[in-house]
Amino acid sequence: MPKVFCLADVCMVPIGTGSASISDFVAAIESKIRESHLKSTLHSAGTTIEGPWDEVMGLIGEIHEYAHELGYVRLQTTMRVGTRTDKHQTAQDKVDVVLKKMGNDN
């Protein structure tokens, strides 16, 4: 059976930090994600991680462990995960299809 490729949109938020700002936390977690060989895209409400299912889910587990090692006691993570078996499609491919249909080929 071939490896299932997935796109996982992940938003991890520390709870109980005493500050409304989480940019320091996001910077630390994003740096850890970028150490991985998996493709990722940071956006305003999280990060999209692309790759084989097992590797993406493994990385999500690793960033949870890393956040706890940094001293964050409680984390809340939301994810949306998409898979398909008929073709390989990246996050950018999905954006490009919509832009093309809107007449914006850039």
Image (cartoon, rainbow, N blue to C red):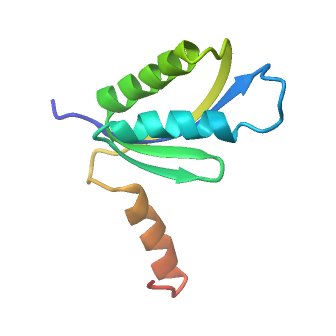
Q: Is residue 50 above or below residue 2?
A: below
Residue 56 occupies which quadrant of the picture?
top left
Q: Is residue 92 visible?
A: yes
Q: How many marks?
A: 0
* Observer-nearest of 96 and 66: 66
Q: Residue furthest left?
A: 1
Q: Is 106 placed left or right of 14 in the picture? A: left
What is the x, y in percent for residue 7?
Answer: 42, 44
Q: Is residue 80 visible?
A: no
Q: Residue at the spot x=42%, y=37% of the render? A: 33
Q: Horizontal and vertical percent for residue 1?
A: 15, 29
Residue at the (45%, 20%) spot, across then down: 61
Q: Quadrant of residue 3?
A: top left
- Name the image quarter holding the C terminus: bottom left
As drawn, is 2 to the left or to the right of 11? Answer: left
**Residue 77 x, y percent position in the rendering:** 62, 27
Q: Is residue 84 above or below residue 22?
A: below
Q: Position of residue 68 (x, y in %)?
A: 57, 14
Image vertical order of residue 47 relative to residue 3, above or below: below
Give the residue displayed 32% in from the left and 41% down from the top: 38
In the picture, measured across the screen, residue 38 lies left or right of residue 69, that is left
Q: In percent of the image, x 62 and y 14: which residue is there?
A: 71
